[in-house]
Image (cartoon, grey):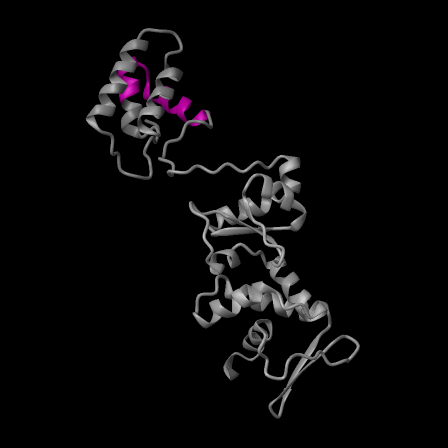
Amino acid sequence: MPNCKTAVPYRGTPEQEERLRKVIEEHKGQTGATMPVLQAAQEIFGYLPEEVQIMVAEGLDIPLSEVYGVSTFYSFFTLNPKGKYQISVCLGTACYVKGAADVLDAVEKKSAAVALEWEYADFLEQQRLARIDRTLSYCYVSLEEEESADPVGWLSGLTLQQKCELWRMFLGKRLFLPEFEWLRDAMLQGAVPNWIEWHLALYRVLEEENIRFFCKDGQFELLDKEGHRIYFGVDHSEAAEQVLMKVLFPLNQ
């Protein structure tokens, strides 16, 4: 006997079962009845649990193995219930170059958002998919049912490479980006998503750009690859500076 069991308990109602019996009766004795009956069954129940497969097999007087074979062969059939909202991500060439892989990665990680490059802004704006704010470093696309203005959600959409780019823009170009304000506020609340990745990203950039840091006698210095000091505000009032200090000297904060 094939393993037809699903991952969740069966919750079919008598009404649903009666509807399926009527469909089975309409197709009983017909050649090729298995496919249309299973399609109807999935429309009724939303999926094809073991109990439904047994009803179809007994009702059409065919082996359960045949029902199970058809149910598992075609990708549009499912043995487990799906969520309320089904997400399909196109991975064709045209979609892939527009950042589909990043979207899929964010969905699989259950991120609240995904951050995409500005070159896709016009397309995203036309489709009303993204938060278009030119003061930000990326286009942020919400993956939640209702778009949230919570910066923590947007931060969760950043990849490790994107975090590296934010650090690189701050350290190399002295750009004080809004994302670091979000990060500083989330840090103060103890709610930074993937906090360890911000550490990894910073140290990767420091190594790649050959930037060295020193702390001696209470004095903090950053030297670029030519040995020149990288200057920041004396009071470290900027969000990016505060996050930098927290990462480099966590025990001194």
- Residue toward you, 58 or 219: 219
Position of residue 156 measured from the top left corner of the image (x, y, whole percent): 50, 57
When asked about the image quadrant of residue 163, the answer is bottom right
On screen, residue 13 versus residue 167, left or right, reads: left
On screen, residue 125 versus residue 111, left or right, reads: right
Residue 68 falls within the magenta-colored stretch: yes
Residue at x 51%, y 66% (from the top left corner): 195
Quarter occupied by the N terminus = top left
Query: Where is 99 relative to 180, above or below?
Result: above
Query: Where is 149 relative to 88, above or below?
Result: below
Magenta: main secondary structure equals helix
Position of residue 33 measured from the top left corner of the image (x, y, whole percent): 37, 12
Residue at x 46%, y 72% (from the top left corner): 188
- Residue at the extreme right of the image, as rendered: 226
Residue at x 31%, y 25% (from the top left corner): 44
Residue 74 falls within the magenta-colored stretch: no
When asked about the image quadrant of residue 249, the answer is bottom right
Range covered by the magenta-colored residues: 55-73
- Residue toward you, 237 or 24: 237
Position of residue 67 measured from the top left corner of the image (x, y, whole percent): 36, 21
Position of residue 173 measured from the top left corner of the image (x, y, whole percent): 72, 68
